[in-house]
Image: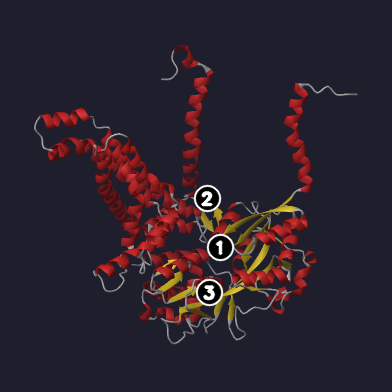
Amino acid sequence: MIFVGSARTGLWPRALAAFAYALPVIVIALPLFSFLSYSFFRVDNGEIVRDLGLFNYRRFFTDAIFIPVLLQTCILCLAVAGLATLIGYPVAFQLANLKGRRRYFLLLLVLVPLLMSYIIKIYAIRSILGGNGFLNRFLLWAGFITQPSSLFVFNLNAVLLTLTILLIPFAILPIFLSLERIPKSLIEASNDLGATNLQTFRWIVLPLSLPGIVTASTFVFVLAIGDFLTPQMVGGQSGFTFGRIIYSQFGTAFNWPFGSALAAILTFVIVIVIGLGNRLERRWL
Amino acid sequence: MTMNINRRTALGLALAAPAILRSSRAFAAKELRIMAWQGYADDDWVKEFQEQTGSTAKVVFIGTDDEIWAKIKGSEGKDFDVFAVNTAQLQRYIDGKLTTPHDLAKLPNQKDVLPRFRDLSKVKGVIRDGKVHAIPFCFDSIGLIYDKDKVNPAPDSFEILWDPKYQGKILAYDNGEHNFSFTALTLGIEDPFHLTDEQLTKIKDKLIKLKQNILSFYTTPDEALQLYKNNDVALIWANYGQQQVKAMKDAGANIEYVNPKEGALAWLDTWAMTSGVQDFDLAEAWVNFLLQKKIGQQLSERTGFGNTVVETGSASANDKLVWLDFVEDPTKRSDLWNEIKAQP
């Protein structure tokens, strides 16, 4: 594309192409292959034994805790993805309808939280939701409750809420981009033909922004499912997710092979969810 | 003969200069790579040590035992020279040949430590096959912090953590090994570090009940303090002992600390040298430097930990301390702990 004619077959473009192919292989494929191969090893007395076998995968299916935790984690993260997309869509819609520089300035404001440290944000949210936190004090003052409520913190509700708050910017951006790309002429044509704003939205804007919705949900789902910090910090005694099991294998358990197997299984689940998302998108369009 | 410095020569010299300078500096600059907990390698000590020995010291701070294992085992002992490790975890490193034995002749200050730590053969875990793999540095117990306004009368045993009266008002440290060990002590088991499968199952059931009684887990002292300030918390089992007590009292909390009567787990931190230590003498100089009475005094003043050279009030004379030991199967305890946490 950039190089035309005789310049296309020179040394320089070939080297560039080779580099472009090599980079993802070295930086992405090789690490993936490395941890995939680890998943077939096992651990004996704190040493990693390199004989291949499916023991780790077998253990995932036979031990009683792994599948229920994985299912619970998936359901939680689908809820997070749904909630974040639901909240993110109106925001993105408003942003896309603004004119000129205001639009990008406000978009920047929406994305500013991403510049903050992840852990600091969780600390802040945990303080707000806590027994003496802002939320409880407001509810007490407003008279909705007579005692501080533990409904919002140290349980799975808190994990859901916190993950949603943290990941909303990731939902807003793809939806905004897909809304921005809808040609104004289509909307104008729809209005000219007599459609109300609601009809235009339902039949023109929504279907055309579907790729953005799917991307947003997928982004949020993938980011949420691997998270082990949020469940640990706000989940209390019931915030145990699949990410935390994987994390624990790389600590005192020092069971890297098993952790790699669990990570491989998680990757597989994510790939399936992304595939389903694509299928859904194609069916609706 | 006068040298005609033309542009080529000047360029050549400029390019060669860093290499020449670096090789001459290599003989003079000694570097010590330290891995430590916060409070074990304070800036002023490091500065004084660097000035005394003419070396540079690079300190990496870690927050959990897991981190130390991941970094030292992960690099097979090559990324650091000297690291702080407790006597329980130390066994894994000796087993994995990740340590270098000390030479007591290079540690004259070790002769003046407190009587309890003078005979190293009495300190469980530091000697293996007649060689000293680690030098005791500081210790503390794992006791119970209770809010004086919320808990009356004063508790004397960890059994209170299972009291339904304090449901949702308890903080617990997130680590399988200690939870199993102190629960074993409350059940009257003599050796909490070598449990049979039957004992492990019994303790697991008791720990599920504990889990259902707590508000949340914590991993660092700051986190425990933040959780205490933002929620109604009455009891904390204090993995970080005096360090937590000091932080909470400084923040104005009306709390008190007690070592349980069934025996308080107590950790003893030591300095060990890695198998990949680059400058043996420099590493020994660091350990010897830290064994000075003034450093020990400052350590205790700043962190509240007990040190090995000067008497402090970390534990009273009547307290029963159970020195931590390597557990029978850390992977199994970790897996069981996951199962406990996975229970609804």
Q: Marks 1 and 2, how far apart in space?
A: 28 Å
Q: Which mark is residue A189?
A: none
The x and y percentages for residue B271 are 67, 64
Tag 2, which secondary structure? Answer: loop
Residue B71 falls in which quadrant of the image? Answer: bottom right
Tag 3, which secondary structure? Answer: helix
Do the residues under discs 2 and 3 have CB atoms within 8 angstroms?
A: no
The answer to whether marks 3 and 1 sit on the same chain is yes
Residue flagged by tag 1: what amino acid is it?
Asp
Residue that appears at 47% across and 35% down: A24
Residue that appears at 65% across and 67% down: B270
> What chain does badge 2 belong to?
A
Residue A272 visible (yes or no): no
Q: Residue furthest right?
A: B1
Q: Dot 1: few (<14), some (14–19), or many (≥20) neighbours within 10 Å?
A: some
Q: Residue furthest left?
A: A194
Q: Which mark is residue B245?
A: 3
The residue pinned by badge 2 equals A51
Residue flagged by tag 2: what amino acid is it?
Asp
Classify A143 as above or below A190: below
Do the residues under discs 1 and 2 have CB atoms within 8 angstroms?
A: no
What's the coloring here? secondary structure
The residue pinned by badge 1 equals B65
